[in-house]
Image (cartoon, rainbow, N blue to C red):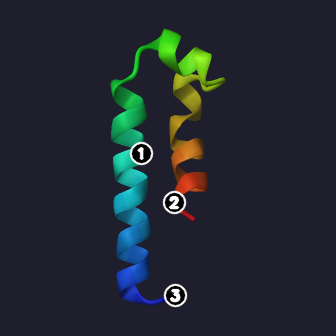
Amino acid sequence: MNIQRSFNNWLKYRETVAELGRMSNRELSDLGISRADIRRVARKDAI
């Protein structure tokens, strides 16, 4: 994996964590995500 791709994946991960982190517990629940799952979901999304 090259540096640019790694950097882009990292940015996508951080953006996803931030976006999900701004959601309320109710909104996360509607998506089937708990607050504890945010990092796992973001990692999966960034790949």
- Provide the residue designation for mark 3: 1
Count residues near mark 2 (Cα–Cα under 10 Å), then give few for <14, some for 14-19, many for 20+: some
- Could you give the CA–CA distance between mark 1 and mark 3, rounded to whole angstroms? 21 Å
**Residue at 51 percent of width and 47 percent of height:** 42
Query: In the image, is residue 18 above or below residue 47?
Result: above
Report the mark closest to the observer, 1 or 3: 1
Residue pushed farthest top?
26
Residue under pointer 1:
16
**Residue where numbered disc 2 is placed:** 46
Q: SS at mark 2?
A: helix
Label located before the other in sequence (1 or 2): 1
Q: Can you give x and y, in whole percent of width and height, for residue 9 in the image?
A: 44, 67
**In the rendered structure, which amino acid carries the disc numbered 3?**
Met
What type is the residue that disc 1 sits on? Thr
Q: Residue at x 61, y 54 (%)?
A: 44
Q: What's the amino acid at mark 2? A: Ala
Give how far across and how far down residue 15 sits, in percent.
34, 49
